[in-house]
Amino acid sequence: MPSTRLANLVDGRLQAPLDSRWLEIHEPATGAVFAQCPDSNAADVDTAVQAAQKAAPGWAATPAEERARLLHRLADLIEGRLDEFAALESRDSGKPVALARRLDIPRAVSNLRFFAAAVMAWDSESHAMESGAINYTLRRPLGVVGCISPWNLPLYLFTWKIAPALASGNTVVAKPSEITPCTAALLGELSIEAGFPAGVLNIVHGRGPITGQAIVEHPGIKAVSFTGSTRTGASIAATVAPQFKKVSLELGGKNPAIVFADADLCDENLDTIVRSGFANQGEICLCGSRLLVQRSIYDSFRERYLARVKALRVGDPQEPSSDLGALVSREHFDKVMRCIAQARDEGGQVLAGGHALSPDGRCADGWFIAPTVIDGLPNDAATNQQEIFGPVVTLIPFDDDAEAIAIANGTRYGLAASLWTGDLSRAHRMAAELDFGIVWINCWLLRDLRTPFGGSKQSGVGREGGTEALRFFTEPRNVCIRY
Ligand code: NAD
């Protein structure tokens, strides 16, 4: 575990912020402050960008094998301290330690390994011309890139960005969320041990509008890969547009899970449907927060679903038995509680939860909310339109495919949809009609890192994952040779 005062990683050294200002880091399960992270300013960012610029030519010229070796080495070091990383992620974010151990940290390791392997297998196109010439595509790294990540899957999303950026030969100035900076700070320490050359990976902690904004607007940053809210994404897009920087935006969602009467609602599938709403306290951008259920099974499904939701155990994230932990911050807790109050005001019927929880013992002052299920609201109600990003699911009945598609597509978002049906033809038809970046059929959160990842409409611009990410972090150059 890092010292309780986290440091920036700049030019291969752990450093305090230049003007020695710090932010308090809370443990969501208790509400107590347990660490401080740098409250960095534009000067800290500038120093990091300069270090990254200095390191850029050498890193771009480093053979892909060596870049991949260092990424694997970093993955090894994280894997060797899996329990420590999982405990830290849980403490910092409020998520159950079992989830961090099973999902977040192994996935961070996989991200590093995947892009280390992907860059080795990556080849460029060539196009022969009958007139006696051949073209090939030379892909060069961009130089210094900015990677900005959110609090909900801290190390998982941080590595999802820095791994392809580094693998493809860029140097990086990265900023994790100021709400959950701890595991990224520990990764920074391990990157020194792994042997990354100074300045290749720089991590500057701090607030979004100060540190994040300074990264986005710095002229030395050639591209920005951002995951976070749609509101921040819009602000970043406006900043980078006049500078003609490349930008990848992975933003919010209001995802539907669509259950047809012919779905196989065995225990395993029902458990997955419940998980798709409440995993990580509903704080996953891919969670299905609108559960659309065909009217002919609505009542019977609702009964079985509610029984499962009410059985979820909310408690100390350190307890292996906890299904849900605490919400990430007091501010976010208040926002979700306001959304539940608004749902009641709109005429929604709260069928489960709808209130805060105060577990016994050390977590009595933590930010816990009971898993909440609401029905009786039309799709155009604010509750069904705005991203709540908490343990709140609404139930909405529908009659047929056309109505399900209209409701599912009827928000400004388009990140992920899941579809539960036994009719394969319907599944294919609907996959083509649903305006989302991901459509899961009879499953949820099955992720193959080779696939394109991203959202349509206000859920984002561009795709990450697999070769999409390697393409984003490189500039293609057409070389044409006449013979
Ligand atoms: P956020 O937009 O508040 O912050 C995300 C990151 O951006 C943080 O590091 C923050 O410090 C930084 N930031 C804030 N303002 C900035 C600015 N003006 N310039 C530069 N950086 C700035 O989001 P959040 O509350 O941390 O995360 C929750 C949101 O993220 C939800 O909307 C969720 O849906 C979304 N999300 C999307 C995906 C996806 O892949 N599409 C994945 C996870 C989370």
Image: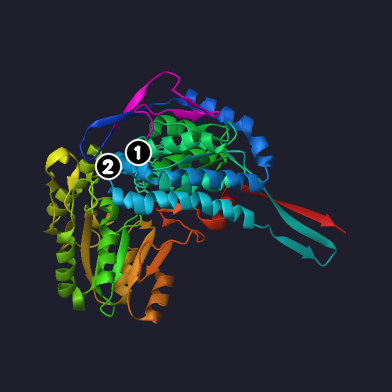
Give the crowd class for mark 1: few <14, some 14-19, many >=20 residues within 10 Å.
many
Prevalent SS, magenta region: loop
- Up/down of 312 relative to 430, above or below: above
- In the rendered image, the vertical position of residue 4 relative to residue 227, given as above or below: above
Marker disc for residue 94: none
Name the amino acid type tagged 2: Val
Under tag 1, what secondary structure? loop
* Coloring basis for residues: rainbow
Vertical placement of residue 127 versus 84, above or below: below
**Closer to the camera in the image, 13 or 402:** 13
Label 2 environment density (alpha carbons within 10 Å; few <14, some 14–19, many ≥20): many
Residue segment shown in magenta? 1-25
Residue 12 lies in the magenta-colored region: yes
Residue marked by disc 2: 328
Percent across and percent down for residue 475 are 64, 47
Residue at x-position 74% and y-position 63%: 127
Is disc 2 in contact with disc 1, using a CB cutoff of under 8 Å? yes
